[in-house]
């Protein structure tokens, strides 16, 4: 069995590498210099991002990117969507001829409005098999080995199945999917809606308001997904509804905590700095706003989040505008 290489030693990259290795399959974790790969190899634990999750024996840490890629045919990228294109360009000359590429990046590319699979196709061409891993997951719980389910989506059925079988071990279960568009849209939009529910809870609006935002947020997600070619049943599955509910209801979500910080009156820059990691929803709000406008899709909740984050509109004013919208049919 050839090793799987996971590129990105943050919390989620580390958790995925641990899970791939739990079943005994050789797994290589690569991190940037600032992620201190030598320290990870020595301590057999990512104390900074995933404390308490010990590395299985099958997991090794490789600080040299070229050496890491030379050993594997299957590469999993766990990097922010904003740098996905740059990382793909960096590794392309180092890939083996039979390389297959998957990623766990969520969100539209800000400069183009493209989904990750579109970026990958542009950089790698049509011949390289591709896949995406997404779903309702918190890295800390995966690191602890708690029961978890994700979707593995690929236009190549055999690749999706092999990845799903490789990562499924213990309480971790992967389901295969062919609707890569739907899986990626779920991951792109849910972080924006998590900011909205965080704001609502931070303002003390209660459970009714939270469920209202999740339900109507799901309607927005599905409208955009269908406009871009996704299947409705995908958006009602793990990578759509599942990921949305998880991110909107638990403070392990950075985006939800970010919304709560905004509701407490903290400026955007301060709230992001206090989170201490990338807040994907901040960037996703702008990208979703642009993509929805381009396709003529009505997404009022996402637009309100955009107004707060990128339009300089006070949160209280946005809430008042949202609650005073004209009555419309639910469907």
Image (cartoon, rainbow, N blue to C red):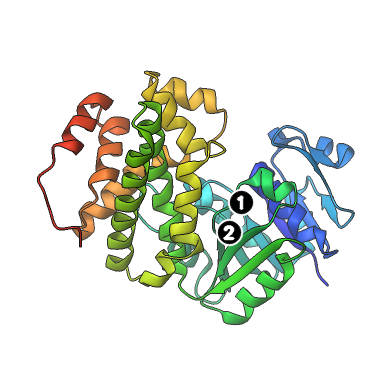
Reading the image, the residue beneath label 1 is 78
Image position, residue 243 (x, y; %): 49, 54
Look at 83% across and 54% down and name the residue there.
59
Look at 67% across and 62% down and name the residue there.
75
Q: Secondary structure at mark 2?
A: strand
The disc placed on residue 103 is 2
Image position, residue 218 (x, y; %): 34, 55
Q: Are marks 1 and 2 in contact (CB under 8 Å)?
A: yes
Q: Is residue 252 above or below residue 99?
A: above
Within-10-Å neighbours for mark 2: few <14, some 14–19, many 20+: many
Look at 55% across and 59% down and name the residue there.
134
Residue farthest to the left? 326
Using the rendered image of the protein, determine whether residue 69 is visible from the camera's viewpoint: no
Nearer to the camera, 319 or 97: 319
Q: Is residue 60 above or below residue 270?
A: below
Quarter of the view holding residue 128: bottom right
Look at 61% across and 51% down and name the residue there.
78
Q: Secondary structure at mark 1?
A: loop
Image position, residue 48 (x, y; %): 72, 32
Quarter of the view holding residue 318: top left
């Amino acid at each position: 069995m050839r090793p799987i290489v996971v590129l990105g030693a943050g919390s989620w990259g580390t958790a995925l590498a641990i899970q791939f290795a739990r079943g005994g399959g050789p797994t290589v974790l690569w991190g940037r210099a600032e992620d201190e790969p030598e320290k990870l190899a020595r301590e057999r634990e990512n104390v900074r991002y995933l404390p308490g999750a010990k590395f299985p024996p099958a997991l090794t840490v490789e600080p040299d990117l070229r050496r890491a890629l030379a050993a594997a045919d299957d590469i999993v990228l766990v990097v922010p969507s904003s740098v996905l294109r740059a990382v793909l360009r960096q590794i392309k000359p180092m890939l083996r001829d039979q390389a297959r590429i998957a990623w766990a990046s969520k969100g539209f590319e800000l400069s183009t409005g493209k989904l990750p699979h579109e970026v990958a196709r542009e950089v790698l061409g049509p011949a390289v098999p591709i896949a995406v891993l997404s779903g309702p997951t918190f890295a800390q719980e995966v690191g602890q080995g708690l029961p978890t389910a994700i979707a593995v989506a690929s236009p190549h059925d055999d690749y999706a199945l092999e990845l799903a079988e490789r990562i499924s071990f213990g309480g971790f279960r992967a389901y295969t999917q062919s609707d890569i568009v739907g899986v990626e849209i779920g991951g792109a939009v849910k972080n924006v809606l998590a900011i909205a529910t965080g704001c609502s809870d931070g303002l003390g609006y209660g459970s009714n308001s939270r469920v209202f935002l999740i339900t109507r947020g799901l309607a927005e997600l599905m409208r955009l997904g269908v406009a871009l070619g996704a299947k409705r049943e995908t958006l009602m599955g793990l990578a759509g509804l599942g990921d949305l509910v998880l991110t909107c209801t638990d403070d392990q979500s950075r985006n939800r905590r970010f919304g709560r910080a905004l509701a407490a009156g903290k400026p955007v820059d301060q709230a992001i700095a206090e989170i201490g990691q990338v807040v994907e929803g901040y960037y996703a709000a702008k990208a979703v706003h642009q993509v929805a406008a381009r396709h003529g899709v009505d997404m009022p909740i996402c637009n309100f989040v955009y107004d707060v984050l990128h339009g300089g509109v006070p949160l209280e004013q946005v809430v008042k505008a949202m609650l005073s919208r004209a009555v419309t049919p639910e469907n």
